[in-house]
Amino acid sequence: MAKLDPAEIGVLLQPYLAEEPSRSLCERVQRYLALLEVWNKKLNLTSVREAAQMVERHMGESFYMARLLPEFQTMLDLGSGAGFPGLPISLMRPEADVMLAEAHAKKAVFLREAVWMTGSHARVWAHRVEEMERDYRFDVVTLRAVDNMPDALALAMDRLEPGGTLAFFTAQGGETRLPEAQWAHVATHNVPRSGGRILIATLAQ
Ligand SMILES: C[S@@+](CC[C@H](N)C(=O)[O-])C[C@H]1O[C@@H](n2cnc3c(N)ncnc32)[C@H](O)[C@@H]1O
């Protein structure tokens, strides 16, 4: 895979960010994607192989979700895989307590290394979300590309605080229905440079 320098990464990230990305952020993205490329040879973490697409699809789209989220203190990324969207969000919200939940043990090892490499403050839960303490709840729950979205959304709902926010990606051309609940606010946003959308739904208090 062709290597991108931090300046090239910055240009690719611009459509997704509210302001110019800092050099430090671009360097962290560079380290993260280099690690992902190495691990991808032994573990199928992503089918995206092209460097610019990795920046846009994985990092850019996750940063874009971060922009759309309200203020929060705690966040769960359910089925984080290689860390998307949770790890990039943790870089944009360093003050928040972000939990990356990934049941696959080797992927969780990758996540711990990626957290360390990027200087993220995120924590890794290396088990199924169902195995967390029953009363563990979060201000925000994010999801992307988790199998069986209806079941995953129901699981995500169980982990939301009253007034909490559910944020997930819906595939190009496909709509995912929200679980039945008292929603105070629901909005969909087109993802830049993609046919995909992000749905942000806030529960009533
Ligand atoms: C297809 S990957 C997507 C990863 C990432 N969100 C992305 O968009 O690139 C889905 C991941 O969710 C994890 N997963 C699915 N259900 C889970 C659960 N209940 N608790 C923890 N991890 C789960 C799987 O192990 C898998 O690695």
Image (tube, rainbow, N blue to C red):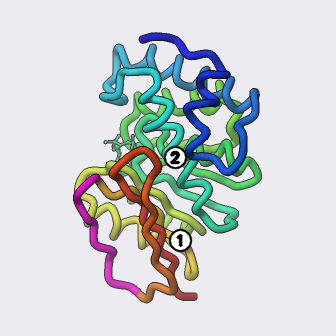
Q: Is residue 205 above or below residue 15?
A: below
The residue where tag 1 is placed is 165
- Asked if residue 89 lies in the magenta stretch, the reply is no
Secondary structure at badge 2 equals helix
Mark 2: amino acid: Ser
Image location of residue 103, percent across then percent down:
38, 43
Q: Residues within 10 Å of mark 2 (few under 14, many from 20)?
A: many
Looking at the rendered image, the quarter that the C terminus falls into is: bottom right
**What residue is at 33 percent from the left and 74 percent from the top?**
178
Image location of residue 151, percent across then percent down:
27, 64
Magenta residues (range): 172-181
- Asked if residue 180 lies in the magenta stretch, the reply is yes
Name the foreground residue: 158 vs 187. Answer: 187
**Tag shown at residue 72:** none
**What residue is at 42 percent from the left and 55 percent from the top?**
143
The residue where tag 2 is placed is 62
Label 1 vs label 2: CA separation?
16 Å
